[in-house]
Amino acid sequence: MYAGAAVAVDLFGHATPAGVAWLRCLGAAAVLLAWRRPPRAAWQGRRLLLAIVFGVVTAGMNVLFYEAIARLPLGTVVALEFAGPVLVAALGSRTLRDVLALVLVACGVVAIADVRIAGSFLGVAFALAAAAAWAGYILLGKRVAVDGDGIDSLAIGFAAATVVLSPLALGTGELWTSPRMLLLGVGVGVLSTVVPYALDQVVLRRLGQARFAVLLALLPVTAGVMGFLLLGQVPSVPEALGTLAVVAGVALRSRDGAERAAGVEPPG
């Protein structure tokens, strides 16, 4: 996912961030539809409506995310965006350990935001809006995985989102003049959408949405590593500490979830 994001950042000099996000959506829809070829039943009734809403929310999340990483380092954005999965995990919080985990995450997000808000308030706003959309992605993704057609619904959802968000295509102008850049844009759709979101559907079918949310704890670290290796983005000390606090808080909450799954009631 974040290897694809690093490629997307390189395209921002030739298209708007929202335009790159739309091209990612188009590429993902084309690959998913060619791969899955959803049956007629998947295009009807409540399943179709659920798929469309899921696709538009997910594509909207990607647009907000790209607008954020156009203004802030990749690792910083993901750490801020991680407030979304934490909110989902918090919906099932019942113990003192849950509360401590949420406090750690909140402190981490505040530490990162405090560093960056002076430099790019808009970037922080986009990242937090993406966090809200990420929470919606998890909640809707669970319904799609269980009640819908899983990856088939993902294909239909991105096809619908490509149409709904088609005005953003106006920001892709220069990409269409270069087969290489166009191929990179479609490649971002495969790397950042087709592979990770298809795997998400497999995992969501087997796990509850709260446990799925806490399993995303590695994402801020992964994003930070990719940002450093591929984009040369070195986090400041407060940002690094904030990211570690986010990961530590989610890991604490994840341990709680693992104990419950094993039938062990955690203390506190």
Image: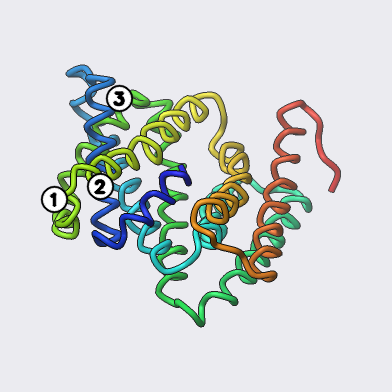
Tell me the element at label 1: helix
Q: Mark 1 points at which residue?
A: 177
Where disc 3 sits, the SS reads: helix
Mark 2 neighbour density, 10 Å: few (under 14) some (14–19) many (20 or more): some
Q: How far apart are marks 3 and 2 (CA)?
A: 28 Å
Left or right for 256, reference 57: right
Q: Are marks 1 and 2 in contact (CB under 8 Å)?
A: yes
Residue underneath mark 3: 152
- Most foreground residue, 38 or 119: 119
Q: Position of residue 124 (x, y in %)?
A: 47, 70
Question: Which mark is in front, 3 or 2?
Answer: 2
Q: Which residue occupies 18% across, 60% down? A: 171
Residue 97, image x and y in percent? 77, 51
For image coordinates 66% across by 57% down, the residue present is 246
Give the amino acid type for the residue marked by disc 1 in the picture.
Thr
Drawn side of residue 54 relative to residue 82, left or right = left
